[in-house]
Amino acid sequence: MRADRLLSLLLLLQNRGRMTAPQLAEELEVSVRTVYRDIEALGASGVPVRADRGPDGGYELMAGYRTRLTGLTRAEAESLFLAGAPGPAHDLGLGAVLATARLKLQAALPAELAQRARALEDRFHLDAPAWFREADPVPYLSEISHAVWEQRTLAVDYRRWNGEVRRVLDPLGLVLKGGIWYLVARADGADRADGSRASGGAVRTYRVSRFLSVRETGEVFERPAGFALAAHWEESSRRMEAKRYQGVAELRVSPAAQKLLPALFGAAGTEALAGAGAADAEGWVRVELRVESPSVAVADLLRLRDGAEVLGPPELRAAVADTVAALAARYAATP
């Protein structure tokens, strides 16, 4: 581990020029004292590191010195596929490996290309999680990632909406969607108390934060012939989207609520506005909005407050009216 850190320290100085001990400590995720010891070790091994004291001081390599130790290890080469997503790479336990791989790659590039690569990092950044939502706790993500990579079967306990289940899974891939990690796995185990296998083999999706326990069984599985994670996820997403909407609500919407439709309902809201009828004298329009189950639809439509009136279907209008009446009765009473 120290040899890897010394190489990272050397590549940092080569790629970025002068850096202070606190800056190096932050990059390497070690203490400043450790940086001092590593600088001494580099000097003792013949690397010409120059130290300048004072407020503008720091460490830098002597002019003209460049290391040729830039060969990528297998793990570093694999981690480069996550170079655009350092946060997820860290979640998967590959943060340090990715950082070293990037340093090696920069060191191997001609000076002009290396400078352009650094400029690109300064101008574009990917932040996967959505706003105003805490990231899911994923304590088993690293173990699951290892099992995916090594094709190791997992025995898991999983929390579903209707209770806990035990499964034996062949983990096929991990997907990060909107800041939430999902595991795509072949589920061979039924709800058996001992977690033993049963026939089946359906490929299902599991939210990683809902795993209550994860352990490798010692078995190695074969991936399904022709399985492609991206293609499976795209098809699964289409099926989920098709099942999501269960009806169409006919609404009368105010000018203010028209502005909220795309923000609150996404593509369905944009689609509804595109097919809106002519505005009346007050600017209200009639739209048809795809909605989910009645209970979800009521909650969603109430977010438009008094800017929307449900015209149909009758059962949805009645459900909204009942909910509003119940709220009015509750707030009419003195607490």
Image (spheres, rainbow, N blue to C red):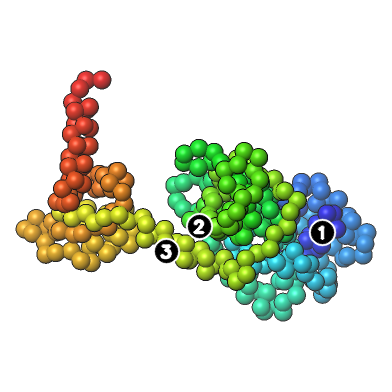
Please name the residue shown 36% across and 61% down the image. 242
Please name the residue shown 72% across and 77% down the image. 109
Against 246, residue 327 (above or below) is: above
- Name the amino acid, label 2: Lys
Quadrant of the snapshot with the N terminus: bottom right
Q: Can see residue 211? A: no
Q: How far apart are marks 3 and 1 (CA)?
A: 44 Å
- In the orientation shown, which residue stands out farthest toward the top? 335
Q: Which of labels 3 and 1 is toward the front?
A: 3
Earlier residue among tags 1 and 2: 1
- Name the amino acid, label 3: Arg
Q: Distance between the residues labelled 2 and 3?
A: 14 Å
Q: Is mark 2 on a helix, strand or loop?
A: strand
Quadrant of the snapshot with the C terminus: top left
Q: Which of labels 1 and 2 is toward the front?
A: 2
Give the residue pinned by disc 1: 4
Give the residue pinned by disc 2: 177
Residue 170 at x, y = what percent?
Answer: 64, 56
Against 297, residue 232 (above or below) is: below
Q: Give left or right: position of 225 versus 57.
A: left
**Residue 78 versus residue 187: which sits nearer the camera?**
187
- Label 1 packing within 10 angstroms: few (<14), some (14-19), many (20+): few
Give the residue pinned by disc 3: 238
Residue 33 at x, y = what percent?
Answer: 81, 46
Residue 83 at x, y = what percent?
Answer: 63, 65
- Label 2 packing within 10 angstroms: few (<14), some (14-19), many (20+): few
Residue 259 at x, y = what percent?
Answer: 25, 57
Q: What element carries label 1?
A: helix
Q: How far apart are marks 1 and 2 (CA)?
A: 32 Å
Q: Is mark 3 on a helix, strand or loop?
A: helix
**Residue 124 versus residue 312: which sits nearer the camera?**
312
